[in-house]
Every structure is written in structure tokens, then in C-alpha cells.
Amino acid sequence: MLGDRIPNIVTECFSKEGSHLNIWGGHNSQEKLLHRYTFLDMDLEATCSDDNKIFGLGSLDLKD
């Protein structure tokens, strides 16, 4: 929970070269609160889909 007392969901998926960690919140966990991309410098099998709503390849995107 990040201050609003609504449980958050943490998800992780992989692109071809890195890991995407997301924290979802809000009603029905539809609001992305945090996205973190970690470049792993190796070939991976991509598990991220359009449903994961990946955005921004910066090292840390935090919603105000």
C-alpha cells in the first residue's frame, strides 16, 4: 500500500534485453504507480505483452 490504503500489485516481465518491474494501484489496480526498467545485457525470451502497458525505458518512472 502506498498511502491510500488500497493494496498494490507488483508485476515483472521481461523484454528482449531487460526486466520491467511495475507497481499497480488504484481501484481495480489499473493505475501504474511505478515502472522500473533494468537493462540486463543478455538475450532473454520476452514475456511482456501489450497487456503489461510498458512505457518509458528510463531507469525509474515514478508517478506523483
Image (cartoon, rainbow, N blue to C red):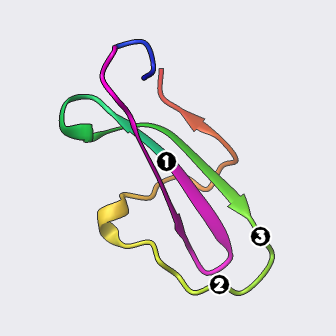
On screen, residue 62 versus residue 50, left or right, reads right
Quickly name the residue at label 1. Answer: 22
Q: Locate the N terminus and report the quarter of the image it occupies.
A: top left
Give 21 or 63, whichever is nearer the viewer.
Answer: 21
Tell me how far mark 3 sits from mark 2, CA to CA: 9 Å
On screen, residue 44 versus residue 29, left or right, reads right
* Quarter assignment of residue 20: bottom right
Rendered location of residue 35, percent (x, y): 53, 45
Q: Is residue 62 above or below residue 18?
A: above
Q: Which residues are magenta?
A: 5-21
Secondary element at tag 2: loop
Residue 8: in magenta span:
yes
Q: Is residue 35 above or below residue 64?
A: below
Give 21 or 6, whichever is nearer the viewer.
Answer: 6
Q: Are marks 3 and 1 in contact (CB under 8 Å)?
A: no
Task: Name the kind of residue labelled 2 in the image.
Answer: Leu
Quickly name the residue at label 2. Answer: 44
Residue 12: in magenta span:
yes
Rendered location of residue 32, percent (x, y): 38, 39
What residue sits 77% from the left and 70% below the top? 40
What residue sits 27% from the left and 28% below the top? 26
Tell me how far mark 3 sits from mark 1, CA to CA: 17 Å
| First in sequence: mark 3 vs mark 1 | 1
Q: Which mark is residue 40?
A: 3
Secondary element at tag 3: loop
* Quarter assignment of residue 52: bottom left
Mark 1 surroundings: few (<14), some (14-19) or many (≥20) residues within 10 A: many
Q: Is residue 36 above or below residue 7?
A: below
Q: Are marks 3 and 2 in contact (CB under 8 Å)?
A: yes
What residue sits 25% from the left and 41% below the top? 30
What residue sits 67% from the left and 69% below the top? 18
